[in-house]
Structure formats: C-alpha cells, structure tokens
Image: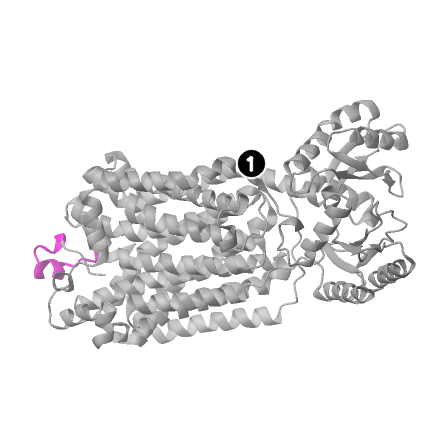
Amino acid sequence: MATFLYKLGKLAFRRRHFVALVWVALLTLAGVGAASAPTAASSSFSIPGTEAQKAFDLLEKRAPEARADGASARVVFKASDGEKVTDPANKAAILKTVGALRSGSDQVARADDPFRAKTVSKDGSTAYASVSYKVTSMELADDDRDALEKTTDKARESGLTVEVGGDALQAMPETGSSEIIGIAIAAVVLVITFGSLIAAGLPLLTALIGVGIGVSSITALADALDLGTTTSTLAMMIGLAVGIDYALFIVSRYRGELAEGRDREEAAGRAVGTAGSAVVFAGLTVVIALVGLAVVNIPMLTKMGFAAAGTVVIAVLIALTLIPALLGYAGKRVLPMGEKGRLFGGGRKASAAEDGKPAAEDAKPNMGTRWARFVVRRPIAVLLVGIVGLGAAAIPVSQLELGLPDDGAQPTSTTQRKAYDLVSDGFGPGFNGPLMVVGDLKGADDPKAAAGQIRKTVAGLDDVLAAAPPMFNKAGDTAIISVVPSSKPSGIETEDLVHSIRDTGAKITDSTGAEIMVTGTTAMNIDVSQKLNDALLPYLALVVGLAFLLLIIVFRSILVPLKAALGFLLSVLAALGAVVAVFQWGWLGSLFGVEQTGPIMSMMPIFMVGVVFGLAMDYEVFLVTRMREAYVHGERPGQAIVTGFRHGARVVSAAAVIMIAVFAGFIGSSEQMVKMIGFGLAIAVFFDAFVVRMALVPAVLALLGAKAWWLPTWLDRVLPDVDVEGEGLRTAADRDADPDGDRELTRV
C-alpha cells in the first residue's frame, strides 16, 4: 500500500493543477446541487419493531384523524395571584387564544377548549389547552412555530402567565457558533504546532473543502433519501474532526521529509506513502464505527452513520490527493522560519537540515521524548496510576440511568420548562407525559365492553392517576385511552407503569379478545431507550471485532490491537462515568451550565462508542505505527517507543486538543442533549488521547517488549502485507548510500 500511495502522492504533486481543479469542481457541483435541490421535509422518525411504533402504525391505518404521531403543544395559562382562570375576563382571554390557535396555522388539527376538556386545576389557578398538529414535530415548518409563539405572546397582554410546552416548539439547536469556536481554537493550535501560517492553513482549508462537499451532497440528496438536519450536523462535526486530523499528520510528515533534505516531490510522495497509509486505516476504523450504527435498526440513526461515513471517506481522499497538490503550491513555505520558527520549536530543525545535518541528532529531546523515556523507565507505576484514575472515573457508570430528556430537563429560562413546572404544580407531574393506550378491538365480541375493561384494568394499576374514557375511531374497532401517571415522564416509576400495562395485555386478550399497546411520546422514549440499550453489546462486538482484525493487519501483532481495544473500553467507561457524575448527579453541574439533573440520554453510550472509537483508533494508528516503523527498521522495543513519541506525540497531542476544542464548543448550547454530547465526547477524547494513548499504551508496550510485536507464523503468512511502515519505499540507492539505513527512521 505504501508504494501505491507514494506514487499517488507524487502524481498529485506533479499534476497539482488538475487535482485542485477536480476538487474545486466537485465542491462547486455539490454546492449547485444543494442550492437547486428542493427543500427537504424534516426526516420522519420511526422505530421499527417497537410496540409504540406498531401502535402508531395501527392508528395511522384505522384512525388517521387521531394524528397520533403528530406534533403537540400544551399552552398553559396561570391566573395572577388572587384570581382564577374561570374569572370572566381571564376565561374570555383564554377562549380568544384558543380560537387564534385554531386559525393560526393550516397544520393545526385540533385546539381543545380547556373548560370543555376539563383541563382546569382544582384550585382554578391553572388551565391548559392541548393543540394537535397534522404533521410530526420534525415536519413542522418554522411559520407554524412562529404562529404559535405570536399567539401566546399576544395572550400575555391580558395579564395571564402563558407558557408553551410539548414538542411543537422543538427545533434543531443552532450550532454555528460552536463550530466557529472550534475552528478558531483549531487554527491557534495548528499555528503553535507548525509555526507557519501556511502549514496551519492547509489542514483547515482541506477540512472545510471536505465538509463542504459532504454536507452539500447530503443537502442535495436530503429530499430523495429522507435525510434530516441532524444528519448534516453529525457529518459536519465528524468530517471537520477527521479532516483536520488527517491533513495534520500528512503535512507534519512532509515537513519532516523536507528537513531530511529530500526534494519537494519526493517528500510529498513519502509523506503520503507513510502517513497516508496510517490515514487510510484510521479512516477505515471510523467508517466501520459509523456504518455499524445500522445494527441499532433505527433508520434515522443508520442514515446519520452512513452520511457521516461518506464524509470521512471524502476526508481521506482529500488527504491523499489534495494535500500533496496544495503542498506543491506551498513549497517550503510550510516550514517555520527565523526566530518565529525557533519560538515554536521548528527553526532549529530547519537550520539543521540546511546545514546537511540530521535534524534528529541536532535537536534536543522534545517533551514527547522525555515523557516516553520516563514511562519506559517506570511502566508499572504509570500503568497503575492510569488504570486506577480511569477506574475511579468510571465508578459512577454503575448508577447509570438511561432515558430521553423531557421538558423538565430544559433550562429554567425556557418557556417549555416553565410550562412543565406550571403543569406539575397545578395538576401533577404525570400530566406532562400522558400515556396513550391503544386497544385493537377487532377480535373482541363486544368492542365497547372490551374498551371499558381495558380502562378499568389500567386504572387499577399502581402509579395511575387517571384514565380517560375510551375514544373510538369511526369503525369502532379501535379505542384510545389517555392514561395519566402519578410520576414524571422520565421517571423510573413511569417506565415501570408502561411495562405493567403491557404485562396485563395477555390477560385482557384472554378475557376480551382485544389487544392493547402503549404508545405516545413517553412510551416511545422508553422503547427507544430499550432498543438502544439492547443494541449496545452487539454494536460494540461488531465495531471492536472488525477494527481488531483491521489493526492486526496494520500492526502485524495480536497483543497491540488487543491492548488498543481494552484501552478504548476503559476510556469510554471513564467518560460515561464523568457524564453520569455531572448530568445525573449534578457534580460541578453549575460549571457546565447544567440546570436540571436527570437520566442520561439513551443514545449516549452508542454514540460515544461510535464516534470516540473511530477517533481513538486514529491516535492509536498514528502513534503506534511510528513505533512499529522504528522496530521494523531495527530499533530495540524500548527505543522504538521513544522514537515513536519523538515523532508523533506532538502532532497527536495537537490533534487531540483540536478535537476537544471542537466538541467542548457544544457545551455552551442551551439544549441539554447537545451539551451532554459535547461534554461526553470532549472528556472521552481527553481520557483516550492523554491517559490511554500517551500513558497506558507506552507503559504496556514497555512491559511487553518484543513480545508486543509477536504474530503466529501461520497468521503472518495468511495476512496481506500492507507495508504501513513504508519499507518498500527504501530504494536500492538509499541502501547503497547508507548501509545502516535499514536501522534508521525517516524524520517527522
């Protein structure tokens, strides 16, 4: 592989005009496609195989007028102190608002009068009007949300406290500022790392081109493939992360080849042949992790994974072709110069190369070298400290509670949270998430009696506050019963109630012939959490298993990939522990803007496994391949560790800091889910890059010695030789010029 990529890098360098033109044309084509594509409706959300989804499908078929999966809003009215909502003036204002809600949007299917629907609190201080829409919350247009907000704003002029809950106001959070912050920090880190604006600008430029092509392509295909806005958000985040990483490693290697005295074209070829090989395999691990999301069998999540994987493939192709082409334009301006270069640690290398001296001999040991030597001398101590530290951070995982956040997890300043609190105070927390029990009465001899039996049975269960009379469809073969729990929607008691209702289904079917299903937003959230939880182990086995096989090919070792996988699991557990401590227990919550603790988002474990595993294997491949390269070229195992750190630690650290900055930018979001994702990914990258890869990996390799690179003879014969170390690039001329060349490394 190294030889093929070497030739590709040299070809791209020589044909730089053609390569640059091709990528600009692709970016233009994708941009035109995105601009001319029809505006895509928001992606539909379905969870195949769950009871909640089956109930939605049944209602869609038999009672489409019910709009069971349509968006909903709950407009809550609270009278001033000493007044009641039933007072003539307040009642008139509420009825006027309900009328305005009905006429405010064509998508409104129903807006209930709270006085007829009897949704007035016992003390008369609070009332709420339920608004149902013809489309789901993801398909609701901004104009419809604006109409809802304008109507409630006008209602406040009457002196009533008016707040809006439900999913109708849920819109995708804006993340533009977070991305800008991440890119700005990435630029600063790159300038410090390279000491050259040109060298720092190349990774940013190519990453933005790759993200531009990827996101524009997703936008262009969104309508045809039913892709939602979350798809492009994930693709943008991952594409930006790996795009900067991959370009960073190739540019760094190119600078090292120039410092060794090679001409520019040869340096570009060798950079792509060596670092590019690591980029290919690192990209494959990310693609495996993202495509593996299909195991969960949630269509929206599958599409997100495939789209993000496509963006990663684009980032790899850009790193292998566009980077060497742009290096052809930049020339030696990617090297640090003068006092500025010395300030950033590069001037001495450049001057040494100009004098014809090997840069590695002239330069004093850098921080990576000193740290590696320390770890090699004290591997057991470093290993114990690292494992104990990560183990302690992982302890809170034992108390992990998974769920999907409701309006109670919103910031206290939002109208959704205020409406949630008003309903909880006036009616009880269960009114914020009523369950929808659907009765399939086709098999019942007496449908109405069966529906009555269902209501009576459900009403007698623990934690049921109220069960409304059944509502029948036109054919009379389907009934809908609204059940109000005593506990909040995200509470464990509510989850237990859903399971209890489902457990009684068999008894009801035996006695009446009717079948019952539980659905609604709360039940759907519970089913999603369960589905994600059930898919975690199969997904983990698939992703880690495939990546393990891939890393065996890369490192030609059994123990090194095993160590990489175990280290990753340890870092993910520690990161999840930190998420539980902050967002579920509230530790340091004020520091990260956590206003309400609660269950951890159910997709968080799988999401962290998928994203962090890919990035963790990036760092593993880039760092350990340099150690493998040194070992293959004749260095002792301990010295190979030091050599790998001397060449790779600085760049891997810079890449990790950039990723942490990109993810940490999302912590400032007002959305609890986005905040949680940003914190979880940032702390996971920190643990994996700086504790596992920088401490545990060299400590384990130092303890294993030459055994780390052991591979059974029969397996060595079976595995393809991909030559990640670039041994095939060492020409006969190189060996004739330096008889001991086989024992030396190219400098990065």
Q: Position of residue 196 (x, y in %)?
A: 29, 73
Q: Which residue is mark 1?
A: 534
Instruction: Classify 443 as above or below 338.
Output: above
Q: Residues within 10 Å of mark 1 (few under 14, many from 20)?
A: few
From the viewer's side, name the closer residue of 72 and 62: 72
Task: Find residue 159 and report its horizontal and vertical position in percent.
Answer: 81, 63
Along the viewing direction, whichever of 443 and 659 lies nearer the viewer: 659
Circle 1 — which element?
helix
In the figure, is residue 719 to the left or right of 366? Answer: right
Q: State whether residue 363 appears in this view.
A: yes
Q: Residue 219 appears in which quarter of the rendering? A: bottom right
Q: Determine whether 154 is above or below 78 in the image.
A: below
Outermost residue to the right: 88
Pick whichever, 189 or 286, lies toward us. 189
Q: Is residue 726 magenta?
A: yes
Q: What colouring style does the render use?
A: one colour
Q: In x, y percent, where is residue 332? A: 25, 74
Residue 134, image x, y percentages = 78, 55
Residue type indicated by callout 1: Asp
Q: Split into 4 quadrants, where in the image is the C terminus?
A: bottom left
> Can residue 337 be seen from the camera position used here?
no
Is 179 included in the stretch rendered in magenta?
Answer: no
Magenta stretch in the rendered image: 722-743
Q: Is residue 238 left or right of residue 567?
A: right
Residue at x 58%, y 59% (from the top left corner): 670
Residue at the image position 51 percent from the left and 36 percent from the top: 399
Total numbered badges shown on the rendered structure:
1
Residue at position x 56%, y 57% in the image: 231
Q: Is residue 40 left or right of residue 369?
A: right
> Quadrant of the image for the N terminus?
bottom left
Camera-nearest residue between 351 and 251:
351
